Image: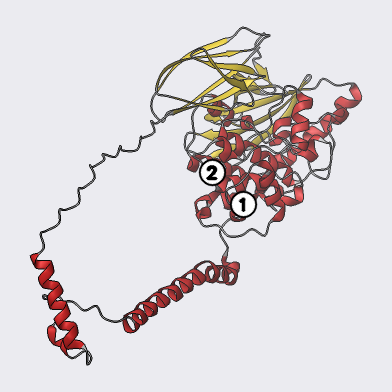
Amino acid sequence: MPLEQLGRYEIIRELGHGAMGVVYKARDPLIDRTVAIKTIAIDFSNTESAAFEKRFYREAKSAGRLNHSNIVTIHDVGKSDDVAYIAMEFLDGQSLREILDSGVVLPPEKIADIAAQVADGLAYAHEKGIVHRDIKPSNIMVLGSGLVKITDFGIALLPSGSRTMADTVFGSPKYMSPEQVMGRDVNGRADIFSLGAVLYEMLTGFAPFIGGDLNAVIDQVINQTPAVPSSRNKSIAPAFDYIVAKAMAKNPDDRYESAQAMARDLQNFRDFAVWRPTRDAAVMRHAASAATLSDPASFQPAAGPDDTASRQRRNLIVYGVPVALVAVIGGWAVLSKRASEVTQPAEIRVNGNAPAEMLAGANPGSSELLRQEKERAQRLASSPPTAAPKTAPSVTKRAPAVAKPMARVALAVTPWGEVYVDGRRKGISPPLAEIKLAPGKHAVEIRNTTFQPYAKTVELKAEAYLKIKHKFQ
């Protein structure tokens, strides 16, 4: 039977299912307000149920004190039979998960804005001593106004307090930090890692860790470093490589010191156009192990106000030395030319090329020299003209071929599939993440030996970007 009442709240309709329960749109008749109700099924033994309920109320109460524009507001908590619930503000928008699954390609400015707003909300929560522990696209809501809200703080765990029930880890492993999946104590930097993973997916269209099963994902989170985002999406700014690497460092001490610091870099990602040598060796090790960079020494954001002196020294080395070298070479060339003009004898020319008086007064033997030159000129004048050399036939150079603009097709296949385009095999996805195709109509087929093949016909325009996502089940 459909649920009609939960506590004092009148259920309007179901909004969706979460990992721990159902989310409803409801009405609070006490103050005539529309709310969202998130339920959490209590399916434990009597002892565990009592412990869970106590922790649930304590953490929901803590989350209810969070008052920030980027955090959903919690109005109430309660219990009805074996169902605990949280009443929170109703949000008219889409989850980031829904946006990404729709295939929409977000522009870099929008990506940076969404991630920066999440970082702002996390920074506020961390200052209050609360770690979310489950930052993922489905827990990030984007409203029509552009405002971003973090949800599910009601089931967050306090950094100094409780463990999960029966050693079970809450959260989504492919977005969790290494220390979290290993069951270690965590702080706000675990949320920073998770936000870095979400940012990675927004930039590339793929989660950074994709395994065949839970154990494979956990192994990747702990031991593997994903390729830098720009290696999967050539159009993004290199600054995002740095931000993602800094946020997703395996060692928590190598990550951003705070979510606010990450928010600042996201808000100013375009200022990363000028690089300087890095002093952050840990981030460089992380980035270098992910991919071969064309300029690893530039993997650092622009210098701040406190780095003025170092920037001036760098500019002196980078710009001053080459300018001085050019000046020295230019001066040497001028002096060499003047020296050659002084030391080499002037060419003696006749018939208008050099005045005869210059020859007459050059030296004691100049009269004889003049006579010889006149005789040579007469001989040249009386000799028949020589035929002009034949010019080589002109060769028409071909204009360099202009590369035809291609379309890009991103692939997200779970668990895996052989990709064929127009009957030709392109590879297995994953790891194949993107293929380039000529504009026009193409037949795409993805095959898995266990399931029925997936087929799709696409019509691509030049420089178009399309994402094909398929889960075999």
Dividing the picture into quarters, in which one does residue 427 lie? top right
Tag 1 secondary structure? helix
Query: Which comes before the other along the chain, label 1 or label 2?
Result: 2
Q: Residue at x 80, y 40 (%)?
A: 179
What's the distance in space between the residues labelled 1 and 2, CA to CA? 23 Å
* Image position of 165 (left or right of 281): right
Of 107 and 261, nearer the camera is 107
Q: Amino acid at mark 2?
A: Ala
- Looking at the image, do the residues carrying marks 1 and 2 touch, with CB atoms under 8 Å apart? no
Q: Which mark is residue 296?
A: 1
Residue 419: percent from the left, percent from the top? 57, 17
Q: Position of residue 157 (x, y in %)?
A: 78, 38
Q: Position of residue 89 (x, y in %)?
A: 60, 33
Q: Which mark is residue 336?
A: none
* Residue topped by disc 2: 112
Q: Is residue 322 left or right of residue 450?
A: left
Residue shown at 80%/31% (left/top)?
A: 169
Picture quadrant where residue 212 is located: top right
Instruction: Name the quadrant of the C terminus.
Output: top right
Colouring method of the image: secondary structure
Give the residue drawn at x 65%, y 36%. Answer: 74
